[in-house]
Image (cartoon, grey):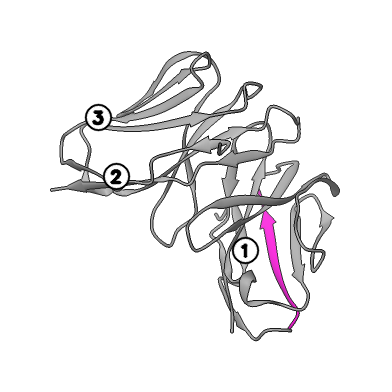
Amino acid sequence: DTAVSQTPKYLVTQMGNDKSIKCEQNLGHDTMYWYKQDSKKFLKIMFSYNNKELIINETVPNRFSPKSPDKAHLNLHINSLELGDSAVYFCASTRGYEQYFGPGTRLTVT
Amino acid sequence: QKEVEQNSGPLSVPEGAIASLNCTYSDRGSQSFFWYRQYSGKSPELIMSIYSNGDKEDGRFTAQLNKASQYVSLLIRDSQPSDSATYLCALESGSSNTGKLIFGQGTTLQVKP
């Protein structure tokens, strides 16, 4: 059984479009995260939700908007996509200290 | 100074040798430290966590923590080609209790048969 899942796995789109990435975890964890991994493999946190409440909001353009309909789901909506948004986006979840990552969504903006 | 520093490598070791991966950090308030392994095109996978000074062993892996020197390391004994991956050092930010992890840029390990 998949613990943390993301859809889609690949996303290719043009500049200016709006897209969403979905994440679901079946681990019963309380906290979920969105990370961005750039072309140099540097992994940086973007947002975190605990029981549907936003607890981490890093310096991210406001074109990025997370939404958590319940504690098992955390979605990421991106408006007006730019070339620099091309990256791999990872969802993660945790109860306690140890975080578990989803398979990632590779976003390519052309 | 970066918050978490790792040598990007690649670190090349022969099969059967000990691979030593190192990480230094600047946040003295950090209490929780982690090593993640990431294969090319895959997601980070947690392999070790360490919270107190000293050594922690799990199979072929040993994590070492020295908070006074702000230093974390990972030793991989009897290295196998399947250990070839990027190893990410991470710590929980000492200034928040939100579980925020700060990652290093990773060290690429190559184990040659």
Does A19 sit left or right of B25 as displayed? right
Label 3: few (<14), some (14–19) or many (≥20) C-alpha neighbours in 10 Å? some
Q: CA distance from mark 3 to mark 2?
A: 10 Å
Q: CA distance from mark 2 to mark 1?
A: 26 Å
Q: Could you say where residue B23 lies in the image, as x and y percent from the top left? A: 44, 32
The residue stretch that appears in magenta: A17-26
Residue receiving disc 2: B83
- The residue drawn where x is 62% and y is 63% is A6
How many badges with numbers are in the image? 3
Q: Are marks 2 and 1 in contact (CB under 8 Å)?
A: no
Q: Is residue A13 above or below residue B112?
A: below
Q: Residue furthest toward the front?
A: B1
Residue receiving disc 3: B77
* B30 inside magenta stretch: no
Kind of residue indicated by mark 3: Arg
Residue B6 tag number: none
Chain holding disc 1: A
Residue receiving disc 1: A6
Q: Nearer the viewer, residue A70 or A42?
A: A42
- The residue drawn where x is 74% and y is 43% is A31
**Picture quarter containing residue B51?**
top right
Asked if badges 3 and 1 are on one and the same chain, I answer no
Q: Is residue B94 above or below residue B82?
A: above
Q: Could you say where residue B107 lies in the image, as x and y percent from the top left? A: 38, 44
Label 1: few (<14), some (14–19) or many (≥20) C-alpha neighbours in 10 Å? many
Chain holding disc 3: B
Kind of residue indicated by mark 1: Gln
**Callout 1 secondary element:** strand
- The residue drawn where x is 56% and y is 51% is A43
Kind of residue indicated by mark 2: Asp
* A23 inside magenta stretch: yes
> Which of the marked residues, 3 or 2, is nearer the chain's N terminus?
3
